[in-house]
């Protein structure tokens, strides 16, 4: 059960972040639209952007799965092991989004993977 929750958390986090990045690169929100008086129009615009709506749903799944994981696993296990999403996101950012991933970023993702593996044991 514990590893199933970890899989759900990592999978939904990765999907949410990829969709969010994809959509935000397609439709950039100007900085002046982030002023408090214009938030309503920004939120309204978000609801018409299907990838962002789906990303929000996956973020909710990740959040509630993490809450469930914390009900039967230690925080010292849950946080490091779910950080493995960083590794998958780095790989998929390269493969799906076509982002350039430098050697330093690959090294960072590798260190995260090693740390998650050590703390999950």
Image (cartoon, helix red, strand yellow):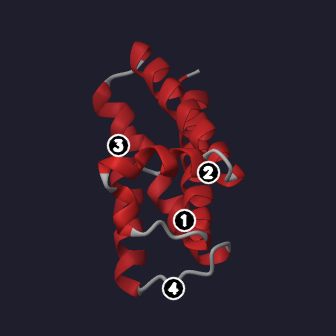
N-terminal of the pair, mark 2 or mark 3, is 2
N-terminal of the pair, mark 4 or mark 2, is 2
- Residue indicated by mark 2: 52
- Residue indicated by mark 3: 80
Task: Note whether residue 117 is visible.
Answer: no
- 51 and 110: which one is in front? 51
Residue 80 drawn above or below residue 29:
above
Q: CA distance from mark 2 to mark 1?
A: 8 Å
Q: Secondary structure at mark 2?
A: helix
The answer to whether the residue labelled 3 contacts the one labelled 1, judged by CB atoms less than 8 Å apart, is no
- Residue indicated by mark 1: 24
**Residue at (33%, 23%) from the top-left corner?**
74
Q: Position of residue 96 (x, y in %)?
A: 68, 72
The answer to whether the residue labelled 4 contacts the one labelled 1, judged by CB atoms less than 8 Å apart, is no
Q: Position of residue 38 (x, y in %)?
A: 40, 51
For the C terminus, give its image quadrant. top left
The answer to whether the residue labelled 4 contacts the one labelled 2, judged by CB atoms less than 8 Å apart, is no
* Crowding at mark 1 (Cα within 10 Å: few <14, some 14-19, many 20+): some
- Which numbered marker is on residue 100? 4
Extreme front residue here? 37
The answer to whether the residue labelled 2 contacts the one labelled 1, judged by CB atoms less than 8 Å apart, is yes
N-terminal of the pair, mark 3 or mark 1, is 1
* Crowding at mark 2 (Cα within 10 Å: few <14, some 14-19, many 20+): many
**Residue at (61%, 51%) from the top-left corner?**
52
């Amino acid at each position: 059960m514990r590893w199933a929750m970890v899989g759900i958390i990592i999978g939904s986090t990765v999907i949410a972040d990829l969709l969010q990045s994809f959509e935000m690169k397609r439709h950039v929100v100007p900085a002046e639209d982030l002023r408090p008086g214009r938030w309503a129009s920004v939120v309204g615009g978000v609801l018409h952007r299907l990838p962002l709506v789906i990303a929000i749903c996956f973020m909710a799944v990740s959040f509630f799965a993490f809450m469930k994981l914390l009900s039967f696993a230690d925080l010292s296990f849950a946080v490091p092991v779910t950080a493995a999403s960083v590794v998958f996101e780095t790989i998929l950012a390269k493969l799906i989004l076509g982002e350039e991933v430098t050697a330093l970023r690959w090294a960072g993702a590798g260190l995260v993977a090693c740390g998650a593996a050590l703390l999950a044991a």
